[in-house]
Image (cartoon, grey):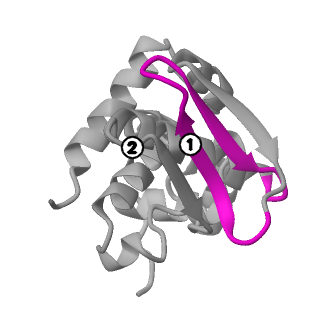
Amino acid sequence: MPPRYSLAKRQAAELLKRAHVKKAPVPIEKLAAFVSAEIVHQAFSGEVSGIVYRNDERSAVIGVNSSHPIQRQRFTIAHEIGHLLLHADENLHVDRNFPIGLRSGISSKSVDANEIEANQFAAALLMPADFIAEDIKPFIGTDVMFAIRKLAQQYRVSEQAMSIRLSTLHYVELGT
């Protein structure tokens, strides 16, 4: 089945609305609690970025690699919330070292629709298009790298994630 981009974006927007989140940075820990997920920070060995385990139909545990930078941890939590909301048939999901952008090594090859969807969800959750549309206004006509850096700080995401998101939303053009 191909990735359900619209569903991922819609689910992220609905979660933000239900949790009354109206500005950046998105309180990702609050959103995890809102979907009845406990966050556990632990230094995982190997390439594990995060895991999600459903205790039952009503609660889950999200494990996050505490040795990763905070921006990556935030993206990992958002990504795992995406798995919870989009992939109800999964009881355990382990993510191995996906980049913090919109894609993983696997998802960038369009091999795993679930990973693509979870990455799209995470990007839409942490960097909502309507928030970006408002927050980018002061940076119109300024240096692109300055804008990316400042918005990444405001949204508490990596500069890589912000540059990909701004490109996806057609605010900047990234070289190929």
Please state the extent of the stretch shown in magenta in the rendering: 45-69
Q: Is residue 169 visible?
A: no
Vertical side of 74 occupied by 158: above or below:
below
- Residue tagged by mark 1? 52
Residue depicted at x 50% and y 52%: 140
Q: Nearer the viewer, residue 51 or 133?
A: 51
Q: Is residue 164 left or right of residue 73?
A: left
Q: Is residue 47 visible?
A: yes
Mark 2 touching mark 1, by CB under 8 A?
yes
Instruction: Report the amino acid beneath label 2.
Output: Glu
Residue depicted at x 21% and y 50%: 4
Q: Position of residue 36 (x, y in %)?
A: 55, 18
Residue depicted at x 44% and y 54%: 119
Q: Is residue 18 left or right of residue 23?
A: left
| Mark 1 surroundings: few (<14), some (14-19) or many (≥20) residues within 10 A | many
| Mark 2 surroundings: few (<14), some (14-19) or many (≥20) residues within 10 A | few
Vertical side of 176 occupied by 102: above or below:
above
Q: Position of residue 110 (x, y in %)?
A: 29, 73
Tell me, for residue 90, which label it has, or none: 2
Vertical side of 51 occupied by 141: above or below:
below
Q: Quadrant of the C terminus?
A: bottom left
